[in-house]
Amino acid sequence: MEVKIKNARLVLVKGDITEEETDAIVNAANSRLAGGGGVDGAIHRAGGPSIMEECRKIGGCPTGQAVITSAGNLKARYVIHAVGPIYQGGTKGEEKLLRSAYEESLKLASKKGLKSISFPALSAGAYGYPLDEAARVALQAVIDYLKTTEGIELVRFVLFDDRTFEAFKRQLTFLKPTIG
């Protein structure tokens, strides 16, 4: 599924983010930048040890923020490590922190002059964020950014399974009228 927002394209695909050839891929990192399971583990395994070495030098990243490293053996040029919130019922500022993780990732990409970026569904796996809510926050953050900022030409959401892809598709269909 694809929509146009000003001069950019927002695309939803089902796939493996480690195979993406965009300028940057976004890692669903933890605040210690210590590697882990899911997307985080897959990116570190595919990218090799140089990514972890850079993460160790950076030291950490607060929830709702993002940092950037090279991409090691990946096809992308950079990995943006974004730290989404652990879902705690929705009363601990999770939506604001999740939105911020997407916005900060996009700002880093813009600052580096990157034209394309691929995101996973931040916080929607092990961090327990309800899928439809996570999709809505993610898509709204990206749409709002692309409406107000030039430079990024392609944002891809690379979603691991059918359930996640369908949730993002539902939310994008719902948000479509707000894009125009």
Image (cartoon, rainbow, N blue to C red):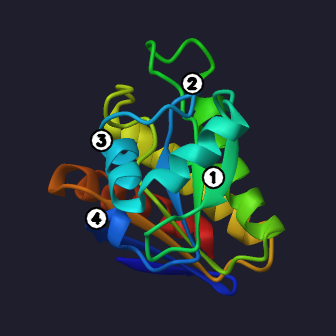
Q: What whole-number distance in Å separates the C-alpha atoms at marks 4 and 1?
A: 22 Å
Quadrant including the N terminus:
bottom left
Q: Secondary structure at mark 2?
A: helix
Q: Which residue is mark 3?
A: 38
Q: What whole-number distance in Å separates the C-alpha atoms at marks 1 and 3?
A: 23 Å
Please provide percent x and percent y for residue 19.
34, 72
CB under 8 Å between discs 4 and 2: no
First along the sequence among labels 4 and 2: 4
Quadrant including the C terminus:
bottom right
Q: Which residue is mark 1?
A: 141
CA neighbours of label 1 inside 10 A, class few (<14), some (14 to 19), many (20+): some
CB under 8 Å between discs 1 and 2: no
Please say whether residue 18 is visible from this viewpoint: yes
Q: Secondary structure at mark 4?
A: loop
Q: What whole-number distance in Å separates the C-alpha atoms at marks 4 and 2?
A: 26 Å
Q: Amino acid at mark 1?
A: Ala
Taking 171 as reference, is 3 left or right?
right
Which mark's residue is nearer the viewer, 3 or 2? 3
Q: Secondary structure at mark 1?
A: helix
Q: Amino acid at mark 4?
A: Asp
Q: Amino acid at mark 3?
A: Gly
CA neighbours of label 3 inside 10 A, class few (<14), some (14 to 19), many (20+): some
Q: Amino acid at mark 2?
A: Glu
Q: What whole-number distance in Å separates the C-alpha atoms at marks 4 and 3?
A: 11 Å
Mark seen at residue 94: 2
